[in-house]
Structures are given as C-alpha cells and as structure tokens.
Amino acid sequence: MKLSTYPKFRRLLTAGTAALAVGVVSLNANIGTLNAEAAAPQIPLRAAAENLLSKVTWNASSDSVTVEGEGLSGTFTLGSTSAALNGKAMTLDAAPYAQNGRVYVSEMGLTALRDASAVAQNRTGFELVSSFDVPSGKAEIASSTPDGQRLIVTEADAGSIAVLDIADPMQPSLLKNVSFKSLSDKAEVTSVAAMPDGNYALAVIRTGDTMQLANPGLLAVVDLRTYEIAKTYPLGIGPDSIAVSKDGRYAVIAIEDEELDPATDEYDYPNAKRPGSISVIEFTDGDALSGTLTDLPVDLSGTEGAIYPHEPQPEYVAINEAGTTAAVTLQENNAIALVDLATKKVTKIFALGTTTHAADVEEDGLVSFTTMMQGRFEPDGIVFSPDGKHLITANEGDLGKNEFEDSVRAGGRNIAVWDLDGNLVYDSLNLIDEAAARAGVYPDDRSPNKGSEVENLAVSTIDGQPILAVAAERADAILFFDLTDAAKPTYLGLIRTAGESPEGIHRVSGRDLFISADEGTGTISFYAKSK
C-alpha cells in the first residue's frame, strides 16, 4: 500500500487558504484589523473549526470568537495571546486578528484546538503511554508471547521480524532481529503469530511473487529461546495473514496470490489466473515442529454477489475462541469464507453487498459529510466477537473507487457486524470518519478514495468488559468500542497513534495493553488503561 509520510493534520488544516476561507465569521465593520504581516502564519478559523465539526460564534461585545463542538469549547480574543480551551487558560504564540471579514489564528492556536478536541474524544479508558520506533523503520503486524513480555513485529520487505522487550511498556527495547533472507533473498514477512506455548513464533513469508513469478511462500518456525529458524513449511504463492487457535492446534493462513504486475503496479483482476487458497496446518499436541498442512481451494462459483469468482484472493484470518472455526475475508470479492477446522473444509461463503451513508467524497480542504455514498464493504481485517456468535469486519476497500463504472465505491469506510449466516446486524455508517474529523485527524485528501481507511481490528475482554479496537490507517487513529452487546457496539472514543498509518492492532497477551504497528513510520504505539 502506497503511503504518504506527510503529516495528515497539516494537510487538512492548511490545505488551500482559499478553500478554508469559504466560511467567514461576520464581524463588526468598525473593528480594526491587526497587522497580519507581523503575526505568525495564520489560518482562517471558521472553516478550520468546522472541519472539526464545531461551530463558530462571533461575540461583538468582547471582540472574541467562541468555538463549540462535541466536548470542545474554546475562546479566542482579537489582539490577545490569551485564550481558553475547555476551561483551561493558554498563551498563544500570536494574537488572532481579523482581515476582510475573517478571523485568523496561528497554527499553534489551531493545533491546540485540535489537540483539545482529540482529548475530548477519548472516553475509552485507555491512553497512549509510549511509543517505540523500530530501528529498521518497518512495523506492520504484531503478536505477543503468552506471558506478555515480548512483542514480535513483522518488518515487511526488510525480510525479518523484530522481537521487542515490552516488560515495561514505558521503556520498550529491541531484543533481537531474525532475518529470513537466508531462505529467500526476496523474503517479505507479511504476518506473524506467537504459539500459545511461548516456545515458537510462526512467520509468514512471501518470496518475490508477481504476476510473472509464481514464487511459493514459506512459513518459518522461529524458536523464541534461541531465535533460530527451527523449521519451515511450504506455502502457496503470496501468503498473507495468519491466525493460530487458542490451544495451538491449528494455524490458518490466507494464501492471497495478488498477481501484481510490477511494470504497471496494477492488478488485472478480470484476467487473473492464480486463485489463491486457504492453508490449514494442524499441529500434533500444539507442537509447531510437528504439523500437517492442508490446502483448501475457495470455490466462489455458487456465491451470488462475488465480484471476481475466479480470483478469491483470501486476505485476512480470524479463529474463534473455541478453535473450531476460521473466518477469512475475500476482500476483492467483498465476501467472507468460513472454515470448519476439524474437517478442514470451507463450509460457507457469503457476499456482503453494499452500505449507504453520508460521506465526504471531495478533496477540497473542507470536511463535510453531506454526500450520500454507496460502497462495497470489501473488508480487510476480521475478528470474531468474544462469544463467537458474530463476525466484525474492518471495511477498508481495495478495488478501484469506481471499478465497474456504477458509482459504487470501494470500501465501506466503516466497521460492520455480521451473524454467522452473513446477515448484517450492525453498520457504523460514517461514525469513524466523523470521529476522526472531531479529533482533527480526518484525511481530506483521501475523501475521493476510502476516507479514514478502516484497516484492522482486535477484540479482547478486559476487566470483564469486551473491547473492540479499530485501526483507521489514514486517520492515524485507534477507535475503541464496547462489545457488551456485540450486535450493537457502543463507541467509546478515539486515540491518535504515535506514528503514522496503523496497519496492525493487537491486545498484548494477559495485559491491559493494546499496541498498534504504525506502518508509515515503523512505530509501535502503546495504549494502556488510564490511571
């Protein structure tokens, strides 16, 4: 996935003064204009505040402007560096001023407003407590050892995993890098999972497959006591996600086989010839060194609504708590497959249809959720609810934004809850994009595409409360939901990531701690219970 490293909030809040100045604050004509040239670089307040879904009111008697939003209250006074945000006084680096009927504030003032709004959105019971920049600059997917003391992080095209000491999340450190370049000089690690016995980690490796090169993948078993590669299993072409059952009996791997044409950096789905599959490995007594692999074809010929039936492209895997069933997203087909692990058979496949809700679909510097959008869900990440009765999907989208010239967009920009027969029981609609906007992290430059781009999820029960954590990749944010009623998730709030572009989200084993692997900057962000 191609990512921009330019900070998203700066793009949003300063992109195009002409666009941001569309909304104006009505001012008394007799108010004098301060010397704008003497002030720090300034931003039109009304449009920027409205991008936070807040309202702006001009108070003529006090020459001040009030900004009011959900959990947000701020006052800026013309000619004064004194301001108030959510009842707290602050000093600005430059005084707001009025010019041509508009009020301008400095970037510091707007950043403070944005920060206050973001803090107000966090009702999660968690907080960002620390971060760690992986030395390779790579971090995508993470898994923790059963004791919760070590974190294993994929380093993607660096061809390695990083093992971190996270005993103290305030002081994480690198213990070891394990390279797989000895297995293939084109090794790319796409996923990782620690075995429940804590002795081994399973790393999924691509070996340079393209449309032209049908290079098979590998599953490498890493001994976590010696950090040596203890064994490998052959996999199909282009393996992606892996999940391991709680008892360690099964590992399930999505064999995606994307068939990327490196000459065009595109996928020719209609003419794809390698369909991918689902691999199930059964380990004797949970021993990672004693496994039997079964490769399952995915037949979409009878699935009504499948987009490219000849090209299932399994994407992401989840296994229920009981260790009996795996769910696999077929993202490009907008479908989900269920696998019975005991019989190693695909038992059900259902297409997901579309969602319709308000969205911002224009990159214009203004955040406005007023256009009705129809989109295919096209989920990436998937989890089971804690009781195993529902599936929850992160509906990122992957096809072109108008793949079939039917005005149906790729990706739902949402999360959705499904029963095990494929019936939709909950749709978050535009909740995630709106929450990102209120926190000042909505990526307006992605409005024509997939918005906040809901990438991945993690579910866990903490202090008796089932929690869903959702990674919004382009918004650089993690959203939390209460899953007490899995059919009706309750939104708790949002926390901004320390790095950019969270790809993986994980609850650390046995601890009240979530982490996100922020792909854009190779950062691990730590979210702990608030004190």
Image (cartoon, helix red, strand yellow):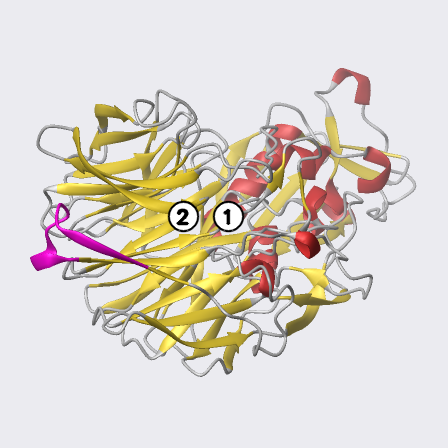
Could you tell me which quadrant the N terminus lies in?
Answer: top right
Amino acid, disc 1: Asp
x 22%, y 36%: residue: 169
Q: CA distance from mark 2 to mark 1?
A: 8 Å
In terms of secondary structure, where does tag 2 sit?
strand
The disc, 2 or 1, on the residue closer to the chain's N-terminal end is: 2
x 61%, y 37%: residue: 9
Assess whether mark 1 and mark 2 are in contact (beta carbons under 8 angstroms). Answer: yes
Tally of numbered discs: 2
Q: Is residue 351 magenta?
A: no
Q: Nearer the viewer, residue 340 or 34?
A: 340
Residue 361 vs residue 136: left or right?
right
Q: Which residue is mark 2?
A: 236
As displayed, is residue 304 above or below residue 246?
below
x 22%, y 28%: residue: 171
x 69%, y 53%: residue: 271
The numbered disc on residue 257 is 1
Q: Residues within 10 Å of mark 2 (few under 14, many from 20)?
A: many
As displayed, is residue 225 above or below residue 492?
above
Q: Nearer the viewer, residue 139 or 203?
A: 203
In terms of secondary structure, where does tag 1 sit?
loop
Tell me where residue 136 sits by quadrant. top left
Q: Residues within 10 Å of mark 1 (few under 14, many from 20)?
A: many
Tell me where residue 250 sits by quadrant. bottom left
Q: From this viewpoint, is residue 481 visible?
A: no
Q: What's drawn in magenta, residue-wise?
A: 283-294
The image shows residue 440 at horizontal and vertical percentages of: 59, 45
Q: Nearer the viewer, residue 273 or 352?
A: 273
Q: From this viewpoint, is residue 96 visible?
A: yes
Q: Is residue 289 magenta?
A: yes
